Image: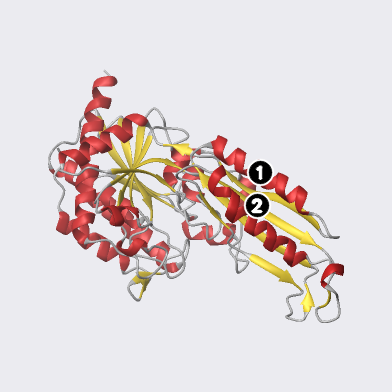
Amino acid sequence: MIAIDGDRLLADLDALARFGACETGVDRVAFSAADVAARRWLAERIREAGLDATIDRVGNVIGRDPTARHAVLLGSHTDTVPRGGRLDGALGVICAIEIARSLRAADAAGGAIGVDVVSFQDEEGTYLPFLGSRAFCGTLDPAEIAAARAEDGTALADVMAAFADGPEPQRLDPTRHLAYLEAHIEQGPRLEAAGRRIGVVTGITGIRRFRVVATGTANHGGTTPMALRRDAGAALVRLAGWVHDRFPALGGPETVWTIGAMAFRPGAANVVPGEAEMSVEMRDLDVAVLDRMEAALAAEVAAAGRGGVAVSIERTTVVTPTAMAGDVVAVLTEAAAAHGETPVRLPSGAGHDAMVLGRIVPAGMLFVPSIGGISHNVAENTASADIVLGCAVLAEAVARLCQRLAVASR
């Protein structure tokens, strides 16, 4: 058992939230002054916990247990979206530091399996989504760094100068890092709605995102008869209605889909749209479900070109689902039960660094409730008691996992 200090955990979360404080939330986008200062502060906290701390050239903050040959890696990210919340990502990093610190304070260090800590850079994608975890896992092409820019045009290569004195990007070592665990706020309403305090993630959903474009002829909205129009907007509205009507039968119980953007051009009230564009996104853990929905959407797009309107579809984003390791899911479930909680098992519809690491080492995630299901917002919050419980459950899972891994490694 690893006994955490709940008051110290909450105090560290409050201290981290001062970097980039914005109303009740945080504005600490990757490589901002607030982000750089927060990472240097994190490195000091990690050293105080008894770990060797480094900040590498992409900005990852990594703490290694100097007494252990093998370790369970704990962490998340500390960058935020603009005007974001104080817990998204930060919760997992501060829980990781608290567990590592508590382990060493209890003189439990020096065991066969230690605890390493990480705060990954730019999970939110200000410059390049999952920059830190992809660099850590060796799946990032240097050409992507050279090409990456923020929305304002700032080059990633330029802002990385803040950490130019650091070592080359640290790499995941599967011979050392036997598993990765990440605590996180749910960022959704399901735990709160169910009256549960702990969620155990079964997997991180795959994503398919599409750009659908209809091309007709712009014309006068008052003088062009309805039967003679080549109305691109009407074609996409019909297609959006089809998505709403047909996707429920094509998807599974956990499938979600979104038409998140739609635009008509030229976009005047008295002009028949000559071009229209919309985005369609679908998410699920099951590749077969995603394949089925994509095929049906493509077939409907092919059939939608009528009345002088051409409709095309382009797949713009593909993210493969990542299942969490079954044995890690089981350990997290047992740890919750040890604290009197029956966790909700659920997929994560949002992407996380665990998605990147889970393709290489066994990974697992624990959720705590988000009040009102709100995240990516300055109003994001979780009850303090739920934060402390979540960290205690994670610590229990780490203790159990370390014990089992130690036996397996003999």
Quick check: 400 above or below 389? above
Quadrant location, the C terminus: top left
Q: Secondary structure at mark 1?
A: helix
- Tell me if residue 38 can be seen: yes
In-front residue for pair 129/241 = 241
Near mark 1 (Cα within 10 A), the count class, few <14, some 14-19 or many ≥20, is some
Quadrant location, the N terminus: top left
Left or right of residue 336: residue 128: right
In the rendered image, residue 376, in percent from the top left (x then y), is placed at: 42, 64
Query: Which residue in the rendered view is the most extreme toward the top?
Result: 410
In the rendered image, residue 399, in percent from the top left (x then y), is placed at: 21, 35
Query: What amino acid type is highlighted by mark number 2?
Result: Phe
- Tell me if residue 168 can be seen: no
For the residues bearing labels 2 and 1, Cβ distance under 8 angstroms? no
Q: Residue at x 43, y 70 (%)?
A: 83
In-front residue for pair 138/345 = 345
Quick check: 229 above or below 122? below
In the rendered image, residue 16, in percent from the top left (x then y), is placed at: 30, 63
Query: What amino acid type is highlighted by mark number 1?
Result: Ala
The numbered disc on residue 296 is 1
Q: Residue at x 59, y 53 (%)?
A: 245
Q: Quadrant of residue 21?
A: bottom left
Q: Secondary structure at mark 2?
A: strand
Q: Residue at x 42, y 47 (%)?
A: 348
Would you name the residue on which mark 2 appears? 210
Lower sequence index among marks 2 and 1: 2
Near mark 2 (Cα within 10 A), the count class, few <14, some 14-19 or many ≥20, is many
How much space separates mark 2 and mark 1, taking CA atoms?
13 Å
Q: Residue at x 47, y 41 (%)?
A: 356
